[in-house]
Image: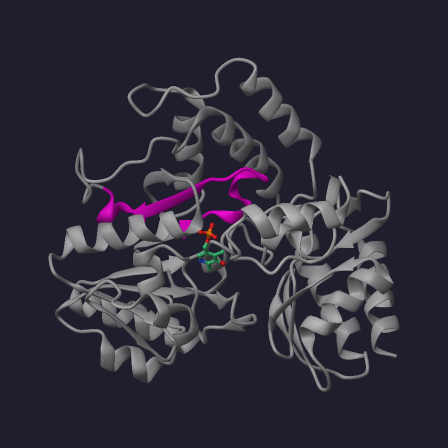
């Protein structure tokens, strides 16, 4: 089917919530994707940090094939080994409490919000301005961005947003605070790190008032920043965290992981999801975790991130290069980021992402090497010269 035919079908039959790029992708392997005409593109976005191990990683594909041929779904009315093993692995690699499975990042945050409200009835949820936690009504209520929230008012009561600074957080958290929900690095708003002193203040304020400190690691998790979980490099341990995006190696899964303090707050019947933690996606996630939880791979992510940022610093018109590991953002001194993304695709066969009028975000596969980083820099360089 030609692109114009796909566009006709979309216009006629698909609710228009997405601004798609004018390319049909038909295949992916490692850091590469191919369009229907056979053109190969270097993918620096990974389906928005989902295919962190590159497209169609053989071990993930094998795990999916194997499990799909034996059992695809039975619901949470039964036990399956992949789900229980995945819960164990998630818990022991992070906060040591218990896990609730769901199907996306927004759902993981919904579960976190319900957990916090269950622990402190009627309590408020505080989030950071500029943050992003998903599009469902609860997660949207925590997503303090006027343009995303305003059309859907009234939102869920009991939510408020504060600047991600130590002073603002200390002033906001009080006796009626159920949860403080924050990203360690705000991704959708352009790769902005929450300052270490704000995280320390958050921990202190939540301890003082018995509130749950919840980190949204939907984007920063699964090795993206050069640690399996980004919080381990902040010196601050949350009471719970949410993960999704890359967890399933390309398949949809989300999880709420608690520490011990909140592990038994949710009770039978309090929450649930038909598909959650199904055997195929759990097997895929176990395979993805096995590969990602590797000190050598994570060290390489940190090194390649440094190399990418250093290279970007050298390019004309590039300012405010930032990020951690292979979660990278920068601003353009001139011109529009979305125009550059279109030119990158057409002229350099390069997939990048614009998160703001002048902001570009790069989320390449964690499995790339120096050659790919240099190739990416050369392509971006040719766009800017
Ligand atoms: C993408 C993202 C979400 C939402 O995840 P979905 O799977 O799209 O619902 C939530 N939080 C953060 C930090 C994200 O980057």
Examine the rendering and report whether any part of residue 3 can be seen: yes
Magenta segment, which residues? 242-263
- Where is residue 161? Give x, y as percent: 31, 74
> Which residue is nearer to you in this view: 258 or 121?
121
Q: Position of residue 338 (x, y in %)?
A: 68, 71
Question: Residue drawn 20% across and 41% down?
Answer: 264
Above/below status of 318 relative to 70: below
Say which quarter of the image contains residue 139.
bottom left
Q: Which residue is pictured at 32% across the width and 25% down the height?
A: 76
Q: Is 244 colored magenta in this rendering? A: yes
Give residue 269's position: percent from left, percent from top. Answer: 18, 34
Q: Is residue 366 visible?
A: no
- Left or right, 86 with reference to 201: right
The quadrant in which the N terminus is found is top right
Assess whether residue 251 is covered by the magenta stretch.
yes
Please state if 295 lies on the left or on the right of 36 as rendered: left
What residue lies at 61% left-to-right and 21% top-to-bottom? 65
Residue 31 position in % (x across, y down): 75, 48
Foreground residue, 320 or 233? Answer: 320
Residue at the far top: name it: 70
The C terminus lies in quadrant: bottom right
């Amino acid at each position: 089917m030609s692109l114009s035919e796909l566009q006709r079908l979309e216009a006629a039959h698909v609710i228009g919530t997405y601004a798609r790029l004018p390319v049909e992708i038909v295949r992916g392997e490692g850091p590469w994707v191919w369009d229907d005409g056979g053109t190969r593109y270097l993918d620096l976005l990974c389906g928005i940090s989902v295919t962190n191990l590159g497209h169609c990683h053989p071990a993930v594909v094998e795990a999916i094939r194997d499990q799909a041929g034996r059992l695809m779904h039975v619901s949470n009315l039964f036990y399956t080994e992949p789900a229980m093993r995945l819960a164990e692995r998630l818990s022991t690699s992070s906060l040591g409490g218990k896990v609730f499975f769901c199907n996306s990042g927004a759902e993981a945050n919904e579960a976190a919000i319900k957990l916090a409200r269950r622990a402190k009835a009627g309590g408020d949820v505080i989030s950071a301005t500029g943050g992003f936690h998903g599009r469902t009504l609860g997660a949207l209520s925590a997503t303090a961005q006027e343009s995303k929230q305003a059309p859907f008012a009234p939102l869920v009561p009991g939510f408020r947003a504060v600047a991600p600074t130590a002073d603002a957080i200390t002033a906001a958290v009080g006796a009626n605070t159920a949860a403080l929900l924050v990203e360690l690095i705000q991704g959708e708003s352009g790769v902005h790190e929450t300052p270490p002193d704000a995280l320390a203040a958050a921990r202190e304020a939540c301890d003082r008032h018995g509130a749950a400190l919840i980190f949204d690691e939907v984007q920063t998790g699964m090795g993206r920043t050069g640690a399996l979980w980004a919080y381990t490099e902040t010196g601050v341990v949350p009471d719970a965290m949410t993960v999704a995006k890359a967890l399933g190696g390309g398949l949809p899964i989300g999880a709420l992981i608690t520490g011990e303090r909140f592990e038994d707050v949710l009770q039978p019947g309090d929450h649930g999801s038909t598909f959650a933690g199904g055997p195929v996606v759990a097997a895929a996630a176990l395979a993805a975790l096995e590969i990602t939880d590797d000190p050598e791979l994570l060290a390489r992510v940190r090194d390649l991130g440094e190399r990418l940022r250093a290279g970007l610093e050298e390019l004309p018109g590039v300012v405010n290069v930032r990020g951690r590991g292979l979660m990278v953002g920068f601003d353009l001194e001139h011109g529009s980021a979305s125009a550059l993304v279109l030119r990158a695709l057409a002229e350099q066969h390069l997939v990048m992402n614009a998160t703001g009028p002048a902001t570009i975000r790069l989320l390449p596969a964690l499995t790339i090497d120096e050659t790919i980083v240099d190739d990416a820099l050369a392509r971006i360089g040719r766009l800017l010269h």
